[in-house]
Each structure stands twice: as structure tokens, then as C-alpha cells.
Amino acid sequence: MLTSENKLATEKIGKLLWTYTLPAIIGTVVMSLYNIVDRIFIGQGVGPLAISGLALTFPFMNMLLAFGMLIGAGSAARISITLGENDKQKAERILANAVTLTFLISGSVIILSLVFMDDLLTLFGGTEKTIKYAYDYMIVIVPGGIFTALYFGMNNILRSSGYPKSAMNNILLGAIINIILDPIFIFVFKWGIQGAAIATVISYFIGTVNVLFHFFQKTSNLRFHAANFKLQKDIVNSILSIGMSPFSMQMGATLVVIIINTTLLKYGGDLAIGAYGILNSLMMLVIMFIIGLNQGAQPIVGFNYGAGNYERMFKTLKYTVIIGTILSTTGFLLGTLLPDISVSLFTTDSELKQISANALRIAVMMFPIVGFQIVTANFFQSIGMAKISIFLGLTRQFIFLIPAIFILPLFWGLNGAWAAMPVSDGLASIVSAITFMLFYKRFKKAHPVISDK
């Protein structure tokens, strides 16, 4: 029997990528179903303004995900590289430090969010009609944020330490619980939007307990040890240096959502924010396929980079780019050809459906090249080149998207706000392509044995 480390070093890339990415894709797609299921049940059971209220919570959910990625993605990448260097003890120190960091950072975010919740919801674009729905959801989701951060973070580590199927099963467990509890709490108990929040927190809690239990078992490749929970400066810095890339991208996404919400409120009113909630759900479903693909490829890329197997590293990247492009192109075709059917899952309100379908057609225009951009940024994160990964992530969010959101609506109104998304996607993909070509040229010069196949 090959150990997980031996498989990463010797097994055929195609088979290995399939082994790691399929569970990861299933896991991330199922994870996105948390929000999608919430929005479907809320839209059908509470109403269109409730969807707009739920959309106001996007920035906070992005913040929670950002801090989960800061620690989870950073520690997962470091663990992969460390295992490639055959240093299991250091990998276990990274694991335990990641848990401690999650409690400290997420706890601080939760306290501040509870104190300033009313101000935050107003900042996020709330009005008298929608804030009440957002508040009911947030007052439950915020305290449960510690489970959200641990759930995301520990699943990343579980996958990177050689257990992709276990990570997938844990996400499936939580999602199934959420899907079962949502209609019970919303329709049977009549708890409305708050019922959806309670269902989500319960499912995250159960998933968190399950994944933490794995690392206490003797059969686990990496285990918790009491002495390792004490924070070590070098470990913390190594986690944060890589985790800063996805963290920056998610925090950028948080700022972007706030700007988008306020812009949509100005040019389209409350229903435009609700349309963005539907649009975001559908686009994120496609992007989650690509994120899952990246999560599956990350241990393979990181391990082989740490072990000096650069041919395998680049071959993995090549396969990942091809699959990512196929996925994003599929999203483009569905959004272009079947927008009305897609948005009707979330609402029966004719005005909201019309706004949402139009938004979806515009927003996915550059999707065929989005897969390449996302995969490339993740590649640099996987090999520890955090600065490049951060640059590629923030290029889309800050250099292109935010200016486009401010400028394009001045000329085309609400459609200009939707058009800002594909414009920034296209420009960011061009920058990613140029950055990678320059990197590859320098890397090949330093390692001339690498082929171009």
C-alpha cells in the first residue's frame, strides 16, 4: 500500500488529480448549497425582500470566510509543503496552531460584529424594508461564526494531510443536515429567515465536531498534541504569509459587495440587491467547482514543489487549467442560454426574476477565461509565493472591479453595475497570463531540466 505522501510523489498525475479534486469539488459545491438552499427556501417561503435582506449579510459571510481562509488555506498549504519536506512534527505544530489562531481571530471578529451590527447593516446597503430580515439572520449567524471558521479551515487541512474523501464526507454531512433542517425550521416551525440561520449554525457545529475528532484519532496521519496548541511565532508567520493571499481576496470581495450593494440600491432599489443575491448564488456555484478543483490540486502542487518534483508540479497545473476552463465555460453557457430557468428557483416574483435574468446574462460574459485566472492565483499560493497570489487576487478586486463599479453605472445605469463584473474578469485574466509567463520564463531558466510539454 502506498502512503498518501508516496502517492503524491509517484502516482500518475491524471489519476492523482481525479482522486483529490473529485472529493474537493463535491465538498465545495455542496458547501455552496448551504447559501443556495437558504436563499431558495427564504425566497419561496418568506418573500423577495427577504432575499434582499439576506444579500445584506454577504459582506459578513465573506469576512468569516476570509478569516477561515487566512488560517485554513495558509496552514493547509504549509502542511503540504512541510510533508513534502518529510517533516511531520512541524506539520502537527502547524495543525494545532491553526486551531488556536482560529479561536483568537474569529472570536475577536464575532465580538466586534455583534457590537456594531446595526451600523454594519446600514453600511452594507440596508433600508427600512430589508434590515429587519438581515438582522434576524445575523443575530444567529454571528455567534456561530466560530464554527464556520473552524469548519472551513479544518476541512482544508484534512484534505491537505491526505484525506480528501474524509473532507468531502464531512462537508456532505453538514450540508445534508442543513438541507433537512431548513424547510422544517422555515415552514413547519414558522421561524422564517432566522430558522435558516439556526439550521446553518447547527450544521456547521456538527461538521466542526466531526473534523476535529478526526485529528484526535490514532489512525490519523496528523494528530493533535497538547503542547502544540501554544502559538509559535515562526509557525504563525508561516501560516499568515500564505493565508494572506486568499484572505486579501476575500476581504476585497467583502468591500466589493458593500460597494455593489450601495450602487445597486442607488440605481435599482431593494430588488436589485435581491437580484445580486440570486446572481451571486448562481455564479458562486460555478466558481465553487473551480475552487474545489484548486483545493484538490493544492496538496499535489505543494508537495511536489517541496520535494523538488517540478515536472509533476507543472503538469498538475496544466491539467487544472484545462479542467477549470471547461467548468467556467459551462457556467457561461448556462448563464447565457438559460438565465430565466436558473433564477426562477429562487423567486416567483416577476419583477425580481426579470432583473436577475438580465444581470446573469451580463455578468457571465467573461466566464470562459475566469477559470484560468482563479487557477493561476491558487498555483502561486500553493507553492508559497504569497505576494504574487495576493497581487493577482487584488488586481481584480481593487484595480479593476471597484473603479468599474463607480464609472460604468454613470453611463449605463444598472446595466453598468452588472457590466463591471465581466470587465474586471477579462482584465484580471490578462494580467494573470502575463504574470505567469514571466514567472515560468524565470523558473525554467533557474531549473533548465523542465520541459515545455
Image: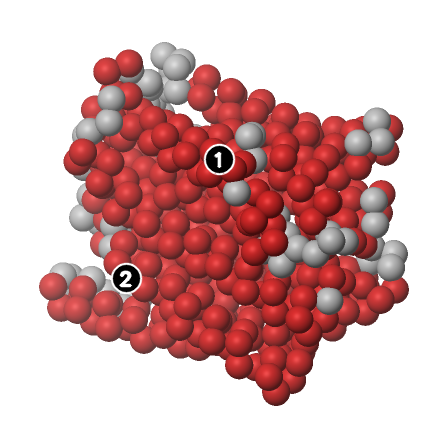
Q: Position of residue 321 (x, y in %)?
A: 43, 62
Q: Whole-percent x and y of residue 98?
A: 33, 31
Q: Residue at x 55, y 49 (%)?
A: 120
What is the basis of the colouring in this image?
Answer: secondary structure
Q: Quadrant of the C terminus?
A: bottom left
Kindly identify the amino acid type of the residue bearing the numbered disc 1.
Ile
Residue position marked by numbered label 2 in the rendering: 388
Considering only order in the chain, which callout, 1 or 2, is on the residue closer to the N terminus?
1
On the rendered image, what quadrant is the N terminus found in? top left
Q: Is residue 327 above or below residue 297?
A: below
The answer to whether residue 95 is seen in the rendering is no
Secondary-structure class at tag 1: helix
Residue 287 relative to residue 193: left or right:
left
**Measured Cα–Cα span from mark 2 to mark 1:** 30 Å
Number of the front mark, 2 or 1: 1
Which picture quadrant has residue 124? bottom right
Give the secondary structure at mark 2: helix
